[in-house]
Image (cartoon, helix red, strand yellow):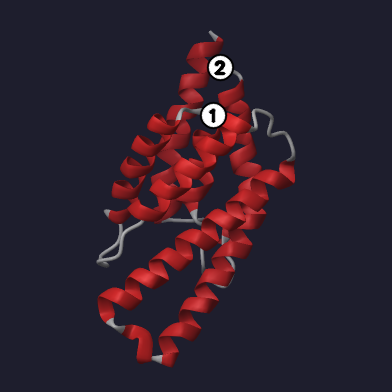
Amino acid sequence: MVRKNQKLIIFFALICLPAFVISSPDLLKLNGITPCWPVIWLLPFSLKNSPFKACISSILLGILIDSFTIEKVSYIPSLFLLSLVWSQYALHNKKIDLFFNIGLMAIFGTAFVGISIWIQNIFLYSALRNNWFHSWSIYVTLSEIIITGLVAPFFSSWLLITYNKN
């Protein structure tokens, strides 16, 4: 019965991720910018699974998130590297109990994803000369880091507790 409930919760979390990406509640926005939902979902999954499973899930998650965007930039490289780092961290440090550790890891992950997308935009569109682009990118990245850092401890901890019950 517990195993069936856990699978139901994990399935519910997988369904909620695209729903949160498409229509994030206004309560979870900061100046119209939503949290980085792929990082919030990938963090507990990478901490509780092997590097191979974490990498496969990050690629699939990146494909899912890229299907919502029209841009040429991709989430796949940054999510792939984050899943490798977090799964290796979990292999060496088996105990992750603190609420703030998850938030801090989500902050660094969101910063990495934001900077990765920023760098991809610079190389693809040669936007290095446009100052307006850089001020807008800094604003979006900082807002996304702040809101993800506030939201991630709640959602990622809940998913981590669900994975721990296995």
Judge the density around disc 1: few (<14), some (14-19), many (≥20) Cα neighbours within 10 Å.
some
Query: In the structure shown, which secondary structural element does the residue marked by tag 1 occupy?
Result: helix
Instruction: Describe residue 134's horizontal placement relative to residue 162 as left or right.
Output: left
Residue pictured at 51% horizontal, 27% vertical: 9
Disc 2 packing (10 Å; few <14; some 14–19; many ≥20) = few
The residue under the point 54% across, 77% down is 139
119 relative position to 100: left or right: left
Contact flag, marks 1 and 2 (Cβ < 8 Å)? yes
Q: Position of residue 93 (x, y in %)?
A: 65, 32
* Residue 159 in view (yes/no): no
Please give left or right for residue 17 compared with residue 88 in the image: left
Q: Amino acid at mark 2?
A: Asn
Query: Does 102 appear above or below 165?
Result: below
Quadrant holding the C terminus: top right
Query: For residue 73, what is the image quadrant?
Result: bottom left
Residue, disc 1: 48
Find residue 166 and name its label: 2
Q: Which amino acid type is shown beneath numbered disc 1?
A: Lys
Q: Position of residue 13 (x, y in %)?
A: 47, 35
Q: Is residue 27 left or right of residue 79?
A: right
130 lies above or below 42: below
Indicate the position of residue 6 as horizontal and vertical percent values.
52, 20
Disc 2 is placed on an element classified as loop
Q: Which callout, 1 or 2, points at the residue further toward the start of the chain?
A: 1
Q: Residue at x 53, y 58 (%)?
A: 110
Q: Name the foreground residue: 97 vs 4.
A: 97
Quarter of the figure with residue 57:
top left
Task: Give the Cα separation between the discs numbered 1 and 2.
Answer: 10 Å
Name the residue: 47% across, 65% down: 114
